Amino acid sequence: MSGMTLPTRKDEEWRYADFAVVQNFTPERFDQWREIDVPAGEAFRECFLLDGTEPDMRRMRVTLGEGATCEMFAVNSCADYARMEVVVRMARGAHFEFGGVTIGGGDVTREFVTRIEHAEPEATSNQVVRSVHWGRAIGNFLGRIDVVRDAQKTDAAQDFKGLLLEKGATANAKPELEIYADDVKCAHGAAIGQLDEQARFYMAARGLTPETARKLLIRAFVADAFTALEDEAAQEQMLEAALAPLGEAL
C-alpha cells in the first residue's frame, strides 16, 4: 500500500471532489474496486442507491465481452459526500447503459464519474445523468469516452442536465471525448438551469398548488435517467428513491 498514488485536485477525475472528506479515507479504500465481468452475449443489470448518512465511495471496473450488455442505474442522494465511479472496457458489439440522478440539499457533494473505453468496433454506449440540488449542495458528472483507433462504427452518447432549485447550489459537468477512429458517432450535451417558470404558471392556472407543480416538473426531469430501465417496477422504485429527498425542499 505504501506505493499507492492517492488522488489530488490535480487529477481531472477528482477535480470537483470534496477533499475535506476524501482526505479522511484510508489509502486502502482507494484500491477497493468491484470487478464485474460480463461474458460474451450475456446481460448484466444492477440498480444502486447511495442514500446513507456517512461518506460513500463505490468504484467499479466493468469488462464487457463480445455482444455483452451492461445496464447500471443509480440514485445518489447521500447525506454526506458520495462518489460512484465506473470504468468500462467494451469488446465488439457490446452495449453499456448508465442512468443516474444526483439529488439533495445541504452542504454536500454528490458525484458520478465514468470512463468508457470503446476498445473494439461496433460497440454502443449511452449515459443519461440528471442533477437536482438546493441549499449549497453540489452535483457532479465527469464522463470520459475513449474510442481507440480500431473501434470503427462506435456509437456513444452522454446527456447531462442540472436543475438548481436555489441560488447557492452548484452543478458541474465535464464531458470528454477522445476519439482515434474516423467512422464513429459520438455526442455529448450538458445544460444547467432552473425550473421552467412558464410551465409552473401554466400548471398553477389549472388548479395545481405550487408544491405539486414543482414536484411534477422535477419528476419529469429526473425520469429521463431511468427511461432505458425496462423493468417497470424497478423504474418506479428508482424514481421514488430519487424524489424522496424533495420533502425537505418543497
Image (cartoon, grey):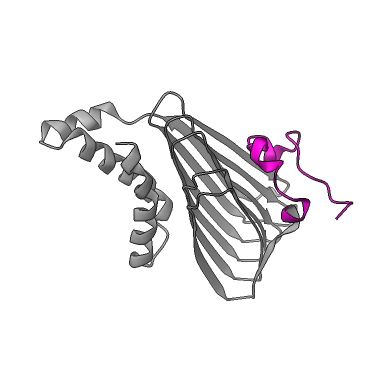
| Residue 107 location (% of width, % of height) | 51, 33
Which residue is depicted at the point 54% across and 48% down?
Answer: 157
| Residue 227 location (% of width, % of height) | 39, 56
Which quadrant of the figure contains the C terminus? top left
Please tell me whether residue 69 is drawn above or below residue 102 in the rendered image: below
> Is there any visible trace of residue 98 in the rendered image?
yes
Residue 126 vs residue 61, the one in the foreground: 61
Please tell me whether residue 30 is drawn above or below residue 216 in the rendered image: below
Which of the 4 quarters of the picture holds residue 103?
Answer: top left
Which of the 4 quarters of the picture holds residue 239?
Answer: bottom left
Residue extending farthest top: 167
| Residue 47 location (% of width, % of height) | 48, 62
Instruction: Please indicate whether residue 234 sits to the left or right of residue 116 in the image.
Output: left
Residue 242 vs residue 187, the one in the foreground: 242
Question: Magenta segment, which residues?
Answer: 1-29
Which residue is depicted at the point 45% across and 31% down?
Answer: 192
**11 in magenta:** yes
Which quadrant of the figure contains the N terminus? bottom right
Instruction: Please indicate whether residue 215 sits to the left or right of residue 60 in the image.
Output: left
Residue 107 vs residue 182, the one in the foreground: 107
**171 in magenta:** no
Instruction: Please indicate whether residue 233 sits to the left or right of residue 28 in the image.
Output: left
How many numbered marks does the figure carry?
0
Magenta: main secondary structure: loop
> Is there any visible trace of residue 91 in the rendered image?
no
| Residue 40 location (% of width, % of height) | 63, 75
Which residue is depicted at the point 42% across and 32% down?
Answer: 134
